[in-house]
Image: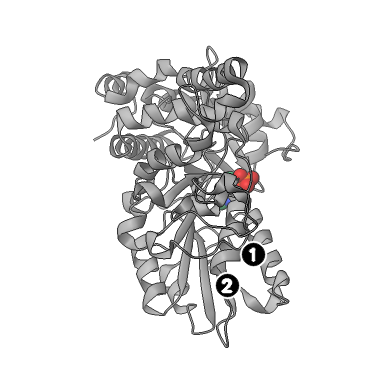
Amino acid sequence: MFKPTEDFAKQLDQNDELSRYKDEFYLNEGQIYMDGNSLGLLSKRAEKSLLDVLDAWKIHGIDGWTKGEHPWFYLSEHLGERVAQLVGAKAKEVVVTGSTTTNLHQLVSTFYQPEGNRTKILADELNFPSDIYALKSQLKLHGLDPNEHLIRVKSRDGRTLNEEDLIEAMTDEVALVILPTVLYRSGQLLNIERITNAAHERGIKIGWDACHSIGAIPHDFHDLGVDFAYWCHYKYVNSGPGGVAGLFVHEKHFGTEPGLAGWFGSDKTKQFDMEHDFTPSESAGAFQIGTPHLLSVAPLIGSLELFEEAGINAIRQKSLRATEYLMYLVNEFLSDFNFTVGNPTDDARRGGHVCLEHAEAASICKALKANGVVPDFRAPNVIRLAPVAFYVSYQDVYKTVKIIKDIMENEIYKQYKNERDVIA
Ligand SMILES: *Cc1c(COP(=O)(O)O)cnc(C)c1O
């Protein structure tokens, strides 16, 4: 179906309806950006909405809370309504707030209610460290020893999780399950429906970390009855460094008192009554804490327009095709150089990036950067390459693999130390 030629890549680009979005983004001349799964690029629309919010401050001062194009007082909820479409939620089930890690703290402090024998939190040994730190500290706040009460399901191959193993670990001692939708290293997409159902059949609540799927993969959190979810917007949603995150709470849990209360979680009509008794909002908005970080929210206003225009299903289709093409080219051009594709190759189980493993991964990544490709390195041996649908063309994918081939053939990577930098 694919051909290993640059002409063929160009042909794929000509037939790609999303190719026109590349001009919407700031890309450096001659550079291929394959790191949108760590920090998405700035779009012109996100830049404009950030400037709009600055203007509102300039023009309206304090009245910006209720005046201007994007009144600040309602912005977190309004954006939540829009983000809801990316995760398959009802408008009131999503709010834009906090960071991934603080949202996880909020949601665990709300929905983790150890009782009798049910005291354990079930996670996995491959999740992002911050999630694990948060879970351990939440257990300690309950006076429980994380060594005993945090179960981390083991991976059989060091890359992926086996769904049977996850389900088998859901014993009657488990109170809460926290899992990533897509694993940040291997890019494995878990079967969210199957695992959510399995948890619920056993009377266990489940929350999903959607950092590596939001903006790349459509979800249906409401229909699946997922209890809660949380994610950042600065990866595939391109909302900028430190961009404010999001959370989903299923409407069946509206009215549950937030574990960490704050006045921005109030019913909006009551917030300025200044009462010392908290009246939480009847929505996911209840799980906000303090004043929203508006300047870090603002780029999302513009960025979401692109998702609304292109549609998350079209984005997923292109991403699947581009990662498939990337894997095909790796097989065509790099088979002599000891690379392993560490992600699941099946469409239904693959996230938005390709995980290339190599013993010299760190030095290969440095050589890639020096040669016009921005990859992402995860110690000790993973090169993550994300052909983001909006701004990576098939021709970029082709060139990337050819550049890797050149780096290997001519041993260019040997000019660099095989060690990670401070940020990797
Ligand atoms: C990116 C990422 C985070 C980052 O958390 P922040 O609070 O935004 O720093 C956490 N967990 C996962 C799984 C991630 O991919």
Q: Is 25 located above or below residue 246 in the figure? A: above
Q: In the picture provided, is 122 more to the left or to the right than 315?
A: right
What kind of residue is marked 1?
Leu
Q: Nearer the viewer, residue 159 or 147?
A: 147
Earlier along the polypeptide chain: callout 2 or callout 1?
Answer: 2
- Circle 1 packing at 10 Å, graded few (<14), some (14-19), many (20+), is many
Question: Picture quarter containing residue 259?
Answer: bottom right
Q: Residue at x 46, y 59 (%)?
A: 228
Q: In the picture provided, is 265 more to the left or to the right than 92?
A: right
Q: Residue at x 72, y 40 (%)?
A: 420
Helix, strand or loop status at disc 2: strand
Q: Nearer the viewer, residue 402 or 19?
A: 19
Q: Nearer the viewer, residue 247 or 196?
A: 247
Instruction: From the image, tell me which residue sits under label 1.
Output: 135
Which mark identifies residue 121? 2
Question: Picture quarter containing residue 35?
Answer: top right
Q: Residue at x 33, y 21 (%)?
A: 19
In x, y percent, where is residue 132? Answer: 64, 61
Tell me: is circle 1 under 8 Å from ligand 1: no
What kind of residue is marked 2?
Ile
Quadrant that contains the C terminus: top right
In x, y percent, where is residue 120? Answer: 59, 77
Q: In the picture provided, is 149 more to the left or to the right than 192?
A: right
Q: Residue furthest top?
A: 29
In x, y percent, where is residue 60? Answer: 58, 19
